[in-house]
Amino acid sequence: MQSYRSTPAPTPLLSLVEGRLIALDAATGQLRWERPVADPVDRVLVAGANVFLATARDPAGHVALFDLATGNERGGIELTFRAAAALATADRVYFSGHRGLLCLTHDGAVVFRAAREITQKSGWSGDTYDLVGTDAQHRELWRIVGAKAHSTSSFLALGHLVAQIDSDT
C-alpha cells in the first residue's frame, strides 16, 4: 500500500545487455537492478508491477516473473511451447507459440492455456494429436480433434491489440 505523500518510483527502463536483464532510471541512467539470464530470451512484457520474461528451453520455454521495482524473482511457469508472440492488457498477459497458448494474470496466476495432446504415437506417419484448452485447474474447456502441426508464424490479436513476430529480419 502506498503511504500518504509518497510518490511512486518512475517505471524503469528495461534492457537485455550481455546476458543480463537490467533496469535503469530512465532519466539518469542509474542502475536500479540487474538479473542474469541464462537462456535465450523470446519475449519480455511489463504488466502491473511485474516483468514477464519468456525464455527458450529447448524444445519448450519458460516464463519467469520479476518484481519491476526490485528485480526480485516472484516465480515462474514452464511452457509447452516457445513464446513467439506476447500481449499485455489491463489485467491479463498472453503468450502464444506454434504449439500452445497461455493466459496469466498480472500476478502470474494461470487463467487458461492450450496445448497439444498426443492421441496416437506413430514412427511412420507422424504423431496424431488434439489441441486442448484447459482452465487453471486443468479442466478441459475445449478440444480440436486431429489438429495438424504447422510451423507458420504465431500471433495474438485482441481487439485493436496485435502481437506477432518480426518476419522482416
Image (cartoon, grey):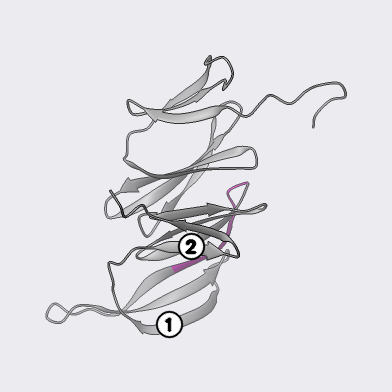
Q: Which mark lies nearer to you, 1 or 2?
A: 2
How far apart, in angstroms, are the residues tagged by discs 1 and 2?
18 Å
Pointer 2 local density, CA inside 10 Å: few below 14, some 14–19, many at least 20: some
Q: Are marks 1 and 2 in contact (CB under 8 Å)?
A: no
Q: Is residue 123 above or below residue 155?
A: below
- The quadrant in which residue 115 appears is bottom left
Residue 8 within the magenta-colored segment of the rendering: no
The kind of secondary structure the magenta stretch mainly shows is strand
The earlier-in-sequence mark between 1 and 2 is: 1
- State the residue at coordinates (52%, 64%): 157
Name the secondary structure under disc 2. Answer: strand
Residue 94: image location, x then y, percent: 52, 57
The reply, left or right, for residue 32 in relation to residue 151 is right
- Picture disc at residue 10: none
Q: Amino acid at mark 1?
A: Ile
The reply, left or right, for residue 146 in relation to residue 103 is left
Residue 63: image location, x then y, percent: 45, 47
Residue 73: image location, x then y, percent: 52, 34
Q: Nearer the viewer, residue 20 or 152?
A: 152
Pointer 1 local density, CA inside 10 Å: few below 14, some 14–19, many at least 20: few
- State the residue at coordinates (44%, 30%): 15
Disc 1 target residue: 144
The reply, left or right, for residue 130 in relation to residue 25 is left
Q: Amino acid at mark 2?
A: Leu
Residue 110 within the magenta-colored segment of the rendering: yes
Residue 168: image location, x then y, percent: 30, 52
Disc 2 target residue: 156
Residue found at the far front of this picture: 168
Residue found at the far right of this picture: 4
Magenta segment boundaries in residue numbering: 107-114
Name the secondary structure under disc 1. Answer: strand
